[in-house]
Image: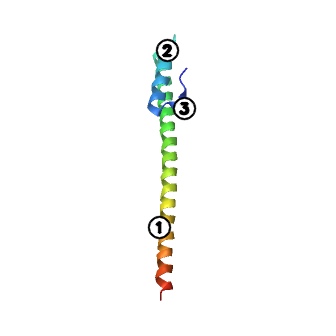
Amino acid sequence: MVNAEILNCEQKQTVCEAKCKASSLVSEQDSNTCKAQCLGERTACELEQSKESAGKLAEQAKDASQSFMDKLKAFWEGLTSKM
């Protein structure tokens, strides 16, 4: 069995659809239902990955803005201490 944690969303969908095809005695309607479920799982997977990426980007932006503010504060303190 393939470890699902190392697969990307598209690969997980491919594995899911292969399982649909491999199921013996499946009608066309059952196969289509199974494939639709696979597509739904892929969509959920991609949404979760997007959410994680957005969270990481937001954290990076927060860190960058804090660094900028720290530098600006140090500049201002250096400027005003000489007056």
Look at label 1 and name its amino acid: Phe
In the image, residue 53 lies at what x, y percent?
A: 48, 47
User: What's the distance in space between the residues labelled 2 and 3, CA to CA?
Assistant: 22 Å
Residue 5 numbered tag: 3
Query: Mark 1 near mark 3, Cβ–Cβ under 8 Å?
Result: no
Task: Count neighbours of disc 1 (C-alpha within 10 A) and say few if under 14, some if 14 to 19, many if 20 or more.
Answer: few
Residue type marked 3: Glu
Residue 63 location in percent, x, y?
A: 51, 60
Q: Nearer the viewer, mark 2 or mark 1?
A: 1
Is 2 rendered above or below residue 42? above
Q: Horizontal and vertical percent for residue 31? A: 48, 19
Between disc 2 and disc 3, whose residue precedes? 3
Q: Quadrant of the N terminus?
A: top right
The circle drawn on residue 68 is: 1
The mark nearer the N terminus, 2 or 1, is 2
Asked whether the beta carbons under mark 2 and mark 1 sit within 8 Å of each other, the answer is no
Give whichever of 69, 20 is nearer the camera: 69
Mark 1 or mark 3: name the one nearer the start of the chain.
3
Q: Residue at x 51, y 80 (%)?
A: 77
| Residue closest to the eye, 58 or 81 | 81
Element under label 1?
A: helix
The residue at which mark 2 appears reads as 22
x and y percentages locating residue 64 in the rendered image: 48, 61
Amino acid found under the numbered disc labelled 2: Ala
